[in-house]
Amino acid sequence: MKHEKYTILILPDNEANGRSYSITATTVNILKFLIVLLLGVIILFSTYYLPKAIEYRHIKMENDFLLNERQDVAGLLKNSKRIEEINHFIESTLGSHYDLSANPGDSTAASMNNWELSPFETMGLLKDLPTYLPIKGFVNAGFKVREGLFSQDHLGIDLSSIEDRVVKAAGRGYVIFADWTYRFGNTIIIDHGNGYLTVYGHNEQNLVTQRQVVDRAEPIAIMGNTGISDGAHLHFEIWYEGVPLDPATFITELSETNSPTVEKDY
């Protein structure tokens, strides 16, 4: 005879009235089924899904590590390409002959291979763009791309001043070169990020060193007459992605001046 219900009797030790609870056989069978199902789920999870979850976590950690490694490699390749571009820019713009022995005691003299990539790779603010006039004065030689086999380009402007001899940075940037060159004497090159470079030549004295970060309008040199020059002035160039720009079309103060310019071959 099947049991239609089960009774659970609870009797206390003090012989007080006890309590009884009755449940049907169907309920008991359902509880048995649920317990077996729960045990099955636990066993299945512990033997199949748990190892899969642990393996997935390890794979994800390895994937994240490889992704970071890939980003580092991409950054190194980008840095290498940028440094190669800067080396080519220096050689093609300033010439390949440098007098690094001109200041043997100067710790700022450094070889071409010691340059670093500018940290300003994501700049775009107004203070980062080279739009500040580096010296207050007048233009005595303008930007000129000459034509002819024996002609020489003047890929910048020459600025002269009687009262102001302090050269300022045209924008915030990173000094990638501050040393002596045969053509421009004491020379400074600043990387402003986003492909912009500025050149300051013929300085009497460089006030900044290589790998130094400078702010917009910060003094960086004293105007002079070093290198191939016939008078004290600042030779100033702006380059974008390897292409020289006319500073007069880039700096508002230069575009508004009416001072006559004289063509020069340096």
Image (cartoon, rainbow, N blue to C red):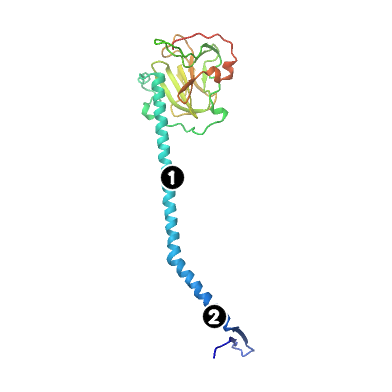
Q: Mark 1 falls on what kind of element?
A: helix
- Whether residue 79 is visible to the viewer of this picture, yes or no, is yes
Residue drawn 43% across the image and 50% down it: 63
Number of numbered discs on residues:
2
- How many neighbours does mark 2 have within 10 angstroms: few (below 14), some (14-19), or many (20 or more)? few
Q: Is residue 185 left or right of residue 172?
A: left
Name the spot of residue 86 as percent of width and height, x first.
42, 26
Report the Cα–Cα distance between label 2 and label 1.
Answer: 56 Å
Q: Which residue is mark 2?
A: 29
What's under tag 2, amino acid-wise?
Asn
Residue drawn at x 45%, y 68% is 44
Q: Which label sits on residue 112? A: none
Give the percent coordinates (x, y) of residue 118: 46, 31
Give the residue at mark 1.
68
Q: Quadrant of residue 68?
A: top left
Residue 205 % position (x, y): 45, 18
78 to the left or right of 22: left
Q: Is residue 113 left or right of residue 141?
A: left
Q: Quadrant of residue 186?
A: top left
Extreme-right residue of the structure: 17
Q: Of discs 2 and 1, which sits in the foreground?
A: 2
- The residue that appears at 48% across and 72% down in the rendered structure is 39
Q: Is residue 115 visible?
A: no
* Above-or-below relation of 111 to 57: above
Which is nearer the eye, 191 or 205? 191
Residue at 42% x, 55% y is 58
Q: Earlier in the sequence, mark 2 or mark 1?
A: 2
Q: Is residue 42 above or below residue 263?
A: below
